[in-house]
Every structure is written in C-alpha cells, then in structure tokens.
Amino acid sequence: MTWIGLSLLALIGIAILYASLPKCGDKVFSPRRLTMAVAPVLVAFGIYLVIGNPSLPAKPFAERAGERNLAAAAAVAGNVTDPNYKTDQQIQRLLNQIVLSLEVNPRNLQGWVALARGSLRLGNIERAVAAFAQAYALSGHNPLLAIEYADTRITAQNGQIDSTSRDLVLHALGQMPNHLLARYYYGMMLKQNDKPEQALRVLRDLYRDLPKDDPLANATQGEIKTLQAVSDARTDTQ
C-alpha cells in the first residue's frame, strides 16, 4: 500500500511539474518538458530508496552523531573498502542531480526537502540549513518542517537558539503542542533565557511523557539534572 500511495503521489507530482513548466511553442506535448518534470521525481525516489524513510527521529540532531553513517568520513578519506562508501557516493550523485533540477525548477518543494535530508545524511550541515530554509518557505510554513529546520539550524550553531530558531520552535509548538522535540527545544529556550524554574517544569513534564527507552529521554534527563543543580544553588544563596 505504501508504494501504491507513493506511486500516485509521484504521478501527481509529475503532472503538476509538467503543467508548471513553460510551453515549447504551440506543441501540445513536449518530450523535453516531460523529461524535466519526471527527472526531479525520479531523483527524489532514488534518495528515498538509498536513505530510507526520512521521518524525523525524536531526539535532537546533535545527539544523533553516533547514528550517522561513517561512510561520509570514509569517502573523504578515499577508503573505498568501507562497505558504506558506495552508498554515500550514490547519495552524493543523487544530490548533485537534485541541485541541477532545482536550478531548472526552484519551486520544487520535495527537491529541497530531499536535498536538506540528504545533506544531513552526509554531514553537510550548512547546505542542509539553507535547503530547509527554502523548503520551509515553499511549504507554507509547515510545522513539521519548522521543527526539522530548527533542529538542523540549532545544531549548526552548536546548540544556541537564535531568534529564527526560536520562532520556528514556537510555530511548531503552537501547531503541535504535544510534539516531543518541539517541547524539548522550548525547554532549552527557557534555559538559555535564564529561566531555569520554567525550563525545569517543561522538561519534567516532557520526561514523564517519554517512553524510558526513547533516545530523547537521556538528553532530557541530563538537562533536568543540570537545571536542578542551578536551582538548588540559587536557593542556597538566598
């Protein structure tokens, strides 16, 4: 059923792309327009097949370094004996094709999303941030993309939450008040704004809702301990 749905979405995407491309004279059908419409969809399918389901893990990207495939480092080192080397090389080729397709049709939302997630897969955080910015704007400010964009942006800034990331988190939280990662970053915003008591309440509530084997639980528990120590120290000085 999943592949039937994906196939239908692909056909719809091709039709929309074909209709949006400029016509070639008075021709009713243009092979060139069809090729330009089909190529981005095929590339997106290729990205999906190589990196799998691109759903967002329920923990900060900064915490997921150990899960990243080390083939990116192997590719840089030229270690072709690494079993994942070819996989990342394939992803890089697909990303190169996506970049070319986006030059032709820069309003291809799925192309920008694939570029962002593929760039993350290879550890290119800066390009991922730029691609997520484009995707988020084209999506009409989709809340799921908002938190994914914020997560990547915060990672690029070594955990610091700037005004753009803050607005993204608040937008996502407003639309999805129970989203675990959005709640985590809201707690971190309060912590960085020197509001440890409020941050503690948010993160404690989050921790109670998290399954104990959830990867986000460890990060949340660590922050709670840090904030509790700060709160205790303030109490002792009063």
Image (cartoon, grey):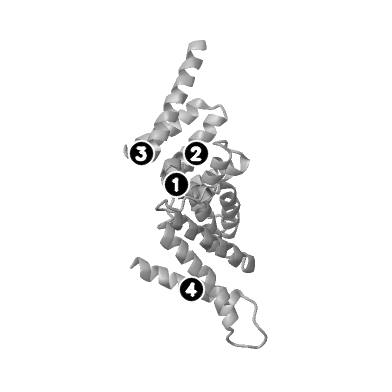
Q: Nearer the viewer, mark 1 or mark 2?
A: 1
- Quote the CA–CA distance across marks 3 and 1: 32 Å
Q: Secondary structure at mark 1?
A: loop
Q: Position of residue 176 (x, y in %)?
A: 46, 48
* Label total for image: 4
- Quote the CA–CA distance across marks 3 and 2: 15 Å
Under mark 4, the amino acid is Ile
Identify the mark at residue 185; answer none if there is no mark: 2
Q: Secondary structure at mark 4?
A: helix
Q: Nearer the viewer, mark 4 or mark 1?
A: 1
Q: Most extreme residue toward the top, as rendered?
A: 237
Identify the mark at residue 209; answer none if there is no mark: 3
Question: In the rendered structure, are the residues bearing label 4 and label 1 in contact, judged by CB atoms less than 8 Å apart?
Answer: no
Identify the mark at residue 12; answer none if there is no mark: 4
- Quote the CA–CA distance across marks 2 and 4: 36 Å
Q: Residue at point 56% right, 36% down? A: 158
Identify the mark at residue 70; answer none if there is no mark: 1
Q: Position of residue 181 (x, y in %)?
A: 45, 43
Which quadrant: the N terminus? bottom left
User: Residue 2's image quarter?
Assistant: bottom left
86, above or below 62, in the image: below
Q: Position of residue 12 (x, y in %)?
A: 48, 73
Q: Residue at point 57% right, 44% down? A: 153
> Within 10 Å of the Cα at label 2, are there few (<14), some (14-19), or many (20+) other Cα atoms?
many
Give the mark nearest the N terminus, 3 or 4.
Answer: 4
14, above or below 156, in the image: below
Under mark 1, the amino acid is Leu
Q: Nearer the viewer, mark 3 or mark 4?
A: 4
136, above or below 165, in the image: below
Residue 207 vs residue 31, the one in the foreground = 31
